[in-house]
Image (tube, rainbow, N blue to C red):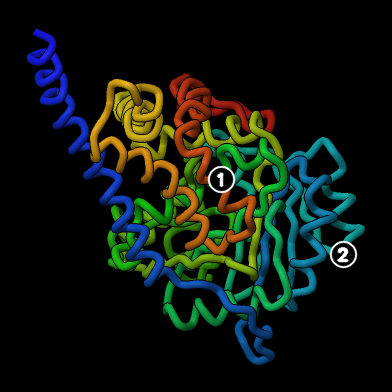
């Protein structure tokens, strides 16, 4: 009887095992393609005869970030750097002025507009450059970053070039979930497909988005995505649908970011985006959570009952994946590579993100948005 039970248990495992192995193999294939094809920024001088560049920073309660990041932006040699103070309560405007930026006071949000799209729309109205670069206040611009970005914008011929900044995480709390931004891009979106001028293959990262002014104005700026929480990707899709070319590149040593300083900050930040990333489908979100638990966590938790080369392969892949993603993203310090050991724990750590994302409303920087 025990022999028959064991054989039945092994047969029941096979389709699940095959599905999970196929999923991780597909992600590995996409990562391999991106390791070869994904553009990387290389530092270069800002061209003296190049286009006029406006670097535009929407800022809400960013007084703690601007002293670290704004000097690097101001040193790039752009035609102008404009900070829009979006109703900050911490002296953001005073900090930006003291550091030397031009500061705008944000107007009250009209009905139907989310905070960041409205801030960016105001910056668009005020900007005087031919190339408009919207960048978040927590993004670090290093020497040669603007020259490298303009070089890639010219080489790619893109109407929108967004940058995936290199994650600069300090402390365990910041490392638990924040690097999953790289995982989402590098293991799910093969770069060659992103250049097909089609909305379903257009992606963007709102941390750094460089537009040709004519392209952005021709679609109405941020108005088409006024009520979107995931406004960056939605705007890229809108541009793709209009036939504009959307591209992306890794920031590497040129552009970095410190998104979240703690695990609770990561949970709050990711929970506002994860449902839109799953097409606003709660069943799909729950399926994704179950799939990650099944692929990365359960092979370890149920190790005494899940035996054989297939389950061993899943365990090894779960440990290696984040490490390989870090290598491709240019994060190669020992602590960055050691994040791979978190692979089996990551789905458990992400459960609070899924739980918050299932709510009807999300809160970010003191504002509440309906999902």
Residue at horizontal 81 percent and vertical 56 percent from the top: 68
Residue 143: name its quadrant: bottom right
Is 315 placed left or right of 307 in the picture?
Answer: right
Judged from the image, the secondary structure of the residue bearing numbered disc 2 is: loop
Q: Is residue 141 left or right of residue 4?
A: right
* Residue picked out by circle 1: 339
Residue at image coords 24%, 40%: 309
Q: Earlier in the sequence, mark 2 or mark 1?
A: 2
Question: The N terminus appears in which quarter of the rendering?
Answer: top left
Question: Residue 237: x percent and y percent?
Answer: 36, 54
Name the spot of residue 44 as percent of width and height, x first: 64, 83
Q: Nearer the viewer, residue 195 or 166?
A: 166
Question: Residue 306 sits in which quadrant?
Answer: top left
Q: Secondary structure at mark 1?
A: helix
Q: Nearer the viewer, residue 167 or 159?
A: 167
Q: Residue at x 37, y 33 (%)?
A: 292
**Front residue (pair 148, 352):** 352
Q: Is residue 5 left or right of residue 352?
A: left
Single out the residue that lies furthest toward the right: 98
Question: What is the number of the mark on residue 155?
Answer: none
Give the CA distance from mark 2 to mark 1.
38 Å
**Residue 210 image-quadrant placement:** bottom right
Tell me if I can see residue 29 in this picture: yes
Q: On screen, 329 above or below 277?
A: below
**Eyeballing the image, is 157 above or below 73?**
below
Image mark count = 2
């Amino acid at each position: 009887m025990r022999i028959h039970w064991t054989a039945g248990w092994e047969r029941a495992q096979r389709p699940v095992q095959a599905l999970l192995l196929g999923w991780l193999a597909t992600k590995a294939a996409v990562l391999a393609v991106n390791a070869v094809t994904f553009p990387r920024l290389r530092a270069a001088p800002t061209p003296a005869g190049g286009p006029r560049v406006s670097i535009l920073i929407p800022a809400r309660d960013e007084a703690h970030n601007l002293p670290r990041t704004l000097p690097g932006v101001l040193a790039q040699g752009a035609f102008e750097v404009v900070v829009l103070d979006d109703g900050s309560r911490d002296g953001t405007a005073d900090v930006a002025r003291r550091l030397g930026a031009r500061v705008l006071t944000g107007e009250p949000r009209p009905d139907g507009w989310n905070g960041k799209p409205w801030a960016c729309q105001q910056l668009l109205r005020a900007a005087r450059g031919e190339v408009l670069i919207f960048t978040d206040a927590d993004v670090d611009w290093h020497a040669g970053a603007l020259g490298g970005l303009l070089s890639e914008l010219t080489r790619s011929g893109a109407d929108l070039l967004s940058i995936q900044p290199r994650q600069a995480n300090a402390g365990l709390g910041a490392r638990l979930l924040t690097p999953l931004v790289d995982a989402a891009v590098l293991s799910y979106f093969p770069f060659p497909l992103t250049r097909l001028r089609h909305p379903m293959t257009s992606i963007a990262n709102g941390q750094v988005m460089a537009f040709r002014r004519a392209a952005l104005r021709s679609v109405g700026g941020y108005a088409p995505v006024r009520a979107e929480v995931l406004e960056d990707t939605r705007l890229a899709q809108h541009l793709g649908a209009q036939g504009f070319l959307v591209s992306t590149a890794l920031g590497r040593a040129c552009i970095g970011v410190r998104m979240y300083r703690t695990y609770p900050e990561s949970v709050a930040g990711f929970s506002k985006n994860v449902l839109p990333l799953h097409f606003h489908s709660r069943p799909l979100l729950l399926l994704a959570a179950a799939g990650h638990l099944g692929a990365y966590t359960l092979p370890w938790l149920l190790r005494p009952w899940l035996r054989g080369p297939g389950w061993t392969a899943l365990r090894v892949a779960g440990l290696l994946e984040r490490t390989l993603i870090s290598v491709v993203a240019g994060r190669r310090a020992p602590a960055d590579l050691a994040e791979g050991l978190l692979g089996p724990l990551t789905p458990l750590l992400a459960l609070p993100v899924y739980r918050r994302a299932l709510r009807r409303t999300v809160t970010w920087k003191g504002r509440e948005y309906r999902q």
